[in-house]
Structure formats: structure tokens, C-alpha cells
Image (cartoon, rainbow, N blue to C red):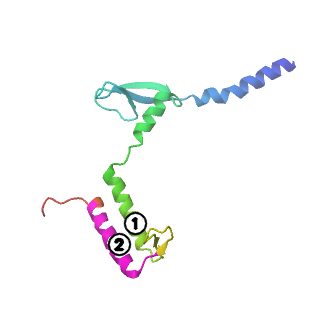
């Protein structure tokens, strides 16, 4: 009787693992250099494939779904962060003379750096107009 109970407990313990192996749809295609590409988005010429959610194919598709930022997007974010720090009203420290000791920016230095950061935000974050 105890062996049957043990076997039943073992089966019950394994069932959640089986249920977790759900299927997801990914799209398989061939890249420009002949490599196999998996994506969560259907593209022209791709083939729908059912895979386990934790399979390497599903993980590769998830990785392609997380689109990398362009250098311009990264530059925009950095410029916005710099401008926010310089506009915060809090003291900003930097190493003015290279001695390894932080110095607090003067009001003039803050104003100059804030203007430069604002120019960078306009250059990297705002759309470029066509001569208008």
C-alpha cells in the first residue's frame, strides 16, 4: 500500500513540470548570410514552428524580440540623462584638474554644460527637418 502511495505522490510531483512545457509559436527563417533566424514576429518567407517555451528556439526568438537600441537612441538617452542631472539644482561634481579629487561645478560651469547638454538633446532626440 505504501509503494502505491509513493508512486502516486511521485506522479503528482512530476505533473506540474509536464504542464509547464507549454508550446509557443516562433517563426523560422533564413538570414541574409544563410544563418537560421528565429523570431516572435512573422516575416516574409518565414515558417511557423511550434516549440516548447523553454527551448533554445523560443529563447532565440525572445532575444530577437528585444530590439537593440541604435547608437542614436543611446546618444539621445545619455544626452537626456546629462541634461536632467545638470538641471536638477543639486551640486554636480567632476574632476576639474585631473588630481582624482571631485570639485563642485560653479554656476557658470553648470550653465555652460547645461546649454551643451540641451544642444545634444536637440541633435540626437528631435527629428531632423527637411530645411523648413
Image quarter of residue 30: top left
Q: 62 or 105: nearer the eye?
A: 105
Determine which residue is flagged by label 2.
Answer: 113
On the image, the x and y values in percent for residue 124 come to 29, 59
**Residue that appears at 41% across and 40% down:** 65
On the image, the x and y values in percent for residue 51 come to 48, 25
Which element type, helix, strand or loop, lies under badge 2? Answer: helix
**Residue that appears at 45% across and 37% down:** 62
Chief SS of the magenta region: helix
On the image, the x and y values in percent for residue 102 come to 49, 71
Magenta highlight range: 104-123
Q: Quadrant of the C terminus?
A: bottom left
Q: Which mark is residue 82?
A: 1
- State yes or no: discs 1 and 2 in contact (Cβ < 8 Å): yes
Image quarter of residue 94: bottom left
> Does the magenta portion include 106?
yes
Q: Residue furthest front?
A: 99
Q: 42 or 95: nearer the eye?
A: 95
Judge whether 123 appears above or below 71 on screen. below
Label 2 environment density (alpha carbons within 10 Å; few <14, some 14–19, many ≥20):
some
**Residue that appears at 41% across and 72% down:** 86
Q: Which mark is residue 56?
A: none
Which element type, helix, strand or loop, lies under badge 1? Answer: helix
Judge whether 47 appears above or below 128 on screen. above
Q: CA distance from mark 1 to mark 2?
A: 9 Å
Q: Going by the image, does 38 lie left or right of 120?
A: right
> Does the magenta portion include 119?
yes
Amino acid at each position: 500500500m505504501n509503494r502505491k502511495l509513493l508512486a502516486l505522490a511521485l506522479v503528482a510531483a512530476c505533473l506540474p513540470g509536464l504542464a509547464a512545457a507549454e508550446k509557443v509559436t516562433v517563426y523560422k527563417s533564413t538570414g541574409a548570410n544563410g544563418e537560421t533566424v528565429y523570431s516572435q514576429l512573422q516575416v516574409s518567407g518565414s515558417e511557423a514552428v511550434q516549440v516548447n517555451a523553454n527551448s533554445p528556439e523560443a529563447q532565440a526568438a525572445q532575444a530577437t524580440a528585444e530590439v537593440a537600441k541604435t547608437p542614436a537612441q543611446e546618444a539621445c538617452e545619455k544626452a537626456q540623462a546629462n541634461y536632467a542631472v545638470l538641471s536638477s539644482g543639486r551640486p554636480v561634481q567632476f574632476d576639474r584638474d585631473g588630481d582624482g579629487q571631485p570639485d563642485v561645478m560653479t554656476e557658470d560651469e553648470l550653465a555652460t554644460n547645461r546649454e551643451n547638454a540641451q544642444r545634444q538633446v536637440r541633435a540626437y532626440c528631435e527629428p531632423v527637418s527637411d530645411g523648413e
